[in-house]
Image (cartoon, coloured by chain):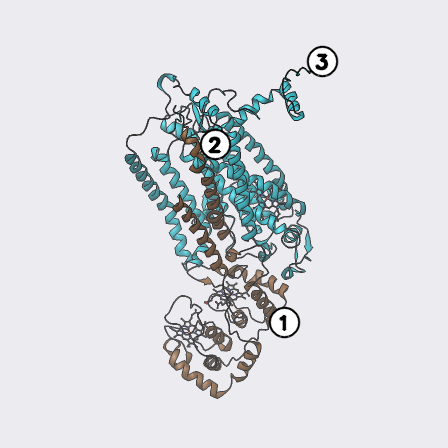
Chain colours: A cyan, B brown
Amino acid sequence: MTGAATPEPPVEGPRTRLGRLGDFFDKRLGLARLARAALDKIFPDQWSFLLGEIALYSFVILVGTGIFLALFFTAGQTTVTYDGSYAPLQGVEMSAAYQSALDLSFDVRAGLFFRQMHHWAALIFMAAIIVHMMRVFFTGAFRRPREINWVIGLSLFLLAFANGFAGYSLLDDQLSGTGLRIGNAAVISIPLVGTWIGSFLFGGDFPGDAIIGRLYSLHILVIPLLIAVLLAAHLTILIRHKHTHFPGKGARDDNVVGQRLWPTYTAKALGLFFITAGVLALMAGLLQINPIWLYGPFDIANVSSASQPDWYVGWLEGALRVMPNWTLSIFGYEIPNPFWGGVLLPGVTFSILYAWPWIEARLSGDRREHHVLDRPRDRPLRTALGVAVLVFYTVLGLAGADDVIAVAFGLSLNAWVWALRVGCIVLPIASAFITFRVCKELQLRDGPAPATGQRAPGGVTPAGDAGGDEAASSDPVPGPAVEPLERLDEAKTPVP
Amino acid sequence: MSSRRSWAVGLLSASVVAGVVLVLVGTAAGDQQPEDVRALSDKLDDPEVIAQGRSLFERACVSCHGDGGQGSDFGPSLLSDGATGADFMLRTGRMPLASPVPQAPSKPQAFSDEETDALVAYVADLAEDRALPVVEAAAGDLVLGGELFRANCAPCHNASAIGGALSFGQHAPSLLEVPGQQIGEAMRFGPGEMPVFGEDVFSDHEMNSIVRYVDYLKDPDDPGGLSLGRIGPVTEGFAAWIIGMAALLIGIRWVTAKLWQRRTEETEVGV
Ligand code: HEM
């Protein structure tokens, strides 16, 4: 044939170089299937499901800002003479740790911004974890099959708590030293083994010369690593279980209604990351936090009035403060007072929290799988109990700041402490009662509860998968997609 | 939606305003200079001034402190107070007291400077103690003052001098509005529950240094943004919730707002 070039038969497979590279891996690893499954993962579109994400992003920011701080921070307790640019401390003897924190604040470019962002992020991290836990608790999201994730979540809370305390204690200013001293007293108060554990942790008597170095390796390496591992497990299990969802809009115990990871949810998650980072950066730039230069270097002989821990430790401090000055002797061994508030209370609290999914299953006799959430009002007893516990710890948290509040409102400190002692018993009971009544009232207002969310008797799954497919493929903006729980449908959204 | 948004804006601006109010603590004017104190010392033994003081005392103070300042059920004896105590109590406005309270609060000075001087002269005469510390903060050493302040005063008055609670309704007041001279007098006199820091404890140089550091704390070199009242972790915790968490909760409400779902609602799936 002359002239007319025969058109090449269309090439099978991708044409771009990147595409071919992808194809190479796909042919060998089957990645496209995985990617498709991941991109198709459906997220319920409800604000309270994003609380955990705020915690996640705060953690990312903590690691980022923490790495910057670690470039300049010295975790040493050797005595040095300050010669940085903060005049009121010029020539004062202090530990290397405190000096490097001062340098970060005054002499390292953007150092103070990063210190403040790191600290604000720590406060927000804890707040977000707690609100996230409240969401999980009040909606019954910890029920089977999600008990393991409840346990992991609690462990994350404890690790974050410990890391926050360690970070706060690193700087070796007067406030952090006071916090460590109280922590040390609580550890020593443990019957029989306390003194031994105390000198093991601190390498001798308080303060010793080892504690800052030890806290440092915990703070920047061990605990963050544990957090990262547990987070990975937390999220993997979440993907495995799929999200829970609230009743309504076709939500059942055997599907998930919401939006796909790609593209809608990705945009939202990325947006939320930037919102979190933006809020934290604004706070870091505009609101001073932990002005250690005013507190001065730690000196075991000094203490400042109004020495408070960060807010999330406040309930422990409060427990120590409201506890009447009782001592109890068992077999001639006197249990020191800090034991009650500083060891027993957190021990009991967290044991109960860890066991809660099983405690509740036993109490209610309901051991079935649940993927549709409870509305808090539909479980008035659980809701009332949760509110009571929150009120209890809030009162303790206020007790941790009792002296500041007494001065601010012109109250007598002693009278106020007694009011708090009564309050931490009376207020939880009263608020539980009120919550219970409010839940019942709301239920009545709703009329008879809709029967959504219950698996049809006999294990028959109502139809619905087909509907889900239709919605996803016909709408360019993937809409409220419905995903069956038992299997992942293929080819819902083309993998780009 | 819009009402919810304006509520959020209201909350945010309220917390910002609260923060600003906390920060804007002004300092009192008309402080005594060292010359004024020396001039006062010079006239403390002037009989005319003492006589003027006695007549003022008989008008404003006898009802509680009794004839010749020997004390009554309503006020302690002044026979051992001397010039320092009188000057401190009068110039911080603690005296005259309106009605007996557990801890006399500080108020604006009640008498003119001249009348106050006369009263001081009279009370000093009762005790034959005319010694007045002369505070010269500028001569003090800022760094030394900081160390002494943190070790001796911060336990009650707080490291940033904002004051603190003591037991049984007493409190150590904020020092941020107290004039330098009265800070020195408070150390030498030891009002109420406060210990006396006499010359055997702090030399004049050390006293001046402490005053210089407190003066510094009134307007510290304080980078990092709004100071949140320098109360420490308590206000920081409230800010984390009221400003940070509030903003982020609004953020997640916005991200999941109905606004973005309008398209999808039209095609809602019946299951
Ligand atoms: C769970 C995550 C974390 C929490 C809750 C946390 C919390 C804190 C807190 C509250 C402080 C005191 C901040 C101040 O007032 O200056 C601090 C200090 C510090 N953190 Fe973290 N942190 C976390 C993770 C990290 C990581 C991953 C690193 C490093 C890779 C790091 C490095 C540091 C350093 C070097 C300091 C001391 C320096 C300074 O603040 O002046 N942190 N941390």
Q: Are marks 1 and 2 on the same chain?
A: no
Q: Are marks 2 and 3 on the same chain?
A: yes
**Cα–Cα span, label 1 and label 2:** 63 Å
Q: Is residue A128 part of the magenta span, yes or no?
A: no
- Residue linked to disc 1: B139
Q: Main secondary structure of the magenta part?
A: loop
Q: Residue at x 45, y 43 (%)?
A: B250
* Tag 3 residue: A2
Mark 3 and mark 1: span between their CA atoms?
Answer: 106 Å
Q: Is residue A69 left or right of residue A138?
A: right
- Of pointers 2 and 3, the one earlier in the residue sequence: 3
Q: Position of residue A182 (x, y in %)?
A: 53, 48
Question: Mark 1 belongs to which subunit?
Answer: B
Q: Are marks 1 and 2 in contact (CB under 8 Å)?
A: no
Residue occupied by mark 2? A150
Disc 2 residue type (three-letter): Trp
Amino acid type, callout 3: Thr
Q: Chain of mark 2?
A: A
In the image, the segment drawn in magenta is: B25-31
Nearer to us in this view, B195 or A89: A89
Along the viewing direction, whichever of B97 and B255 lies nearer the viewer: B255
